[in-house]
């Protein structure tokens, strides 16, 4: 297995025959198909997106991943937080594609954000599972990345957030 690229390692693990790099059959793969605007279709969300919405991958026929970077982020979150299949989509629908804290919609959250950045963060109780991974039992909801940062900077302490709210109310009342 030494000296094999990630594609050939995956083929070897699955017991598949190794295909030659630059094989002519790659030209007919769906990963090379583009629409009339030069966009590529994500294999996960099935949306047509600009090629710069996909991470680069030199081991693929067209040089980019088959799923868009937003979907890559969702798959990574699903794995890191031990989420059941479809949890992210169900939470987005239940929250009407709005952050349950700031109530901003997805299009508003995405304004100014890089195309490759997913606007949603999985909020979980850090006292149960500190860090970026979770057991899945301490997951609270899907919130926007700004609100997730706010909760993180507060140390998930309600009294800190209440104090911050009171500070702002006092400042607005007495500038």
Image: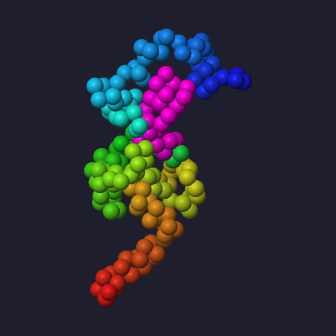
The residue stretch that appears in magenta: 54-79
Viewport quadrant of the N terminus:
top right
Q: Nearer the viewer, residue 158 or 30?
A: 30
- Indicate the quadrant where residue 48 lies: top left
**Residue 100 drawn at (x, y percent):** 33, 58
- Indicate the quadrant where residue 49 lies: top left
Task: Indicate left or right for 104 with 129 as reference.
Answer: left
**Residue 58 drawn at (x, y percent):** 54, 28
Q: Is residue 13 above or below residue 161?
A: above
Q: Is residue 132 above or below residue 29?
A: below
Residue at 45%, 56% in the rendered image: 123
How many marks on residues? 0
Residue lying furthest bottom in this view? 174
Residue at 49%, 22% in the rendered image: 61
- Whether residue 41 is visible to the viewer of this picture, yes or no, is no
- Whether residue 100 is visible to the viewer of this picture, yes or no, is yes
Is residue 70 part of the magenta span, yes or no? yes
Residue at 34%, 44% in the rendered image: 90
Residue at 38%, 52% in the rendered image: 113
Q: Nearer the viewer, residue 117 or 51?
A: 51
What colour scheme governs how the chains and residues are painted in the rendered image of this protein?
rainbow
Viewport quadrant of the C terminus:
bottom left
Is residue 65 part of the magenta span, yes or no? yes
Q: Nearer the viewer, residue 170 or 95?
A: 170
**Residue 150 drawn at (x, y percent):** 44, 65
- Indicate the quadrant where residue 53 lies: top left
Residue lying furthest front in this view? 37
**Residue 32 drawn at (x, y percent):** 41, 21
């Amino acid at each position: 297995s030494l000296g094999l690229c990630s594609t050939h390692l995956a083929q070897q693990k699955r017991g598949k025959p190794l295909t030659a790099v630059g094989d002519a059959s790659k030209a007919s793969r769906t990963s090379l198909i583009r629409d009339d605007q030069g966009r590529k279709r994500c294999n996960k969300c099935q949306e047509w997106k600009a090629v710069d919405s996909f991470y680069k991958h030199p081991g693929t026929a067209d040089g980019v991943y088959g799923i868009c970077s937003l979907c890559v982020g969702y798959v990574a979150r699903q794995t890191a937080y031990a989420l059941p299949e479809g949890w992210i989509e169900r939470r987005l629908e239940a929250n009407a594609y709005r952050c349950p804290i700031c109530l901003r919609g997805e299009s508003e959250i995405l304004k100014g954000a890089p195309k490759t950045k997913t606007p949603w963060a999985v909020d979980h109780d850090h006292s149960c599972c500190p860090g970026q991974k979770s057991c899945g039992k301490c997951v609270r909801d899907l919130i926007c990345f700004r609100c997730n940062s706010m909760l993180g900077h507060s140390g998930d302490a309600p009294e800190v957030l209440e104090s911050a709210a009171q500070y702002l109310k006092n400042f607005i009342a007495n500038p």
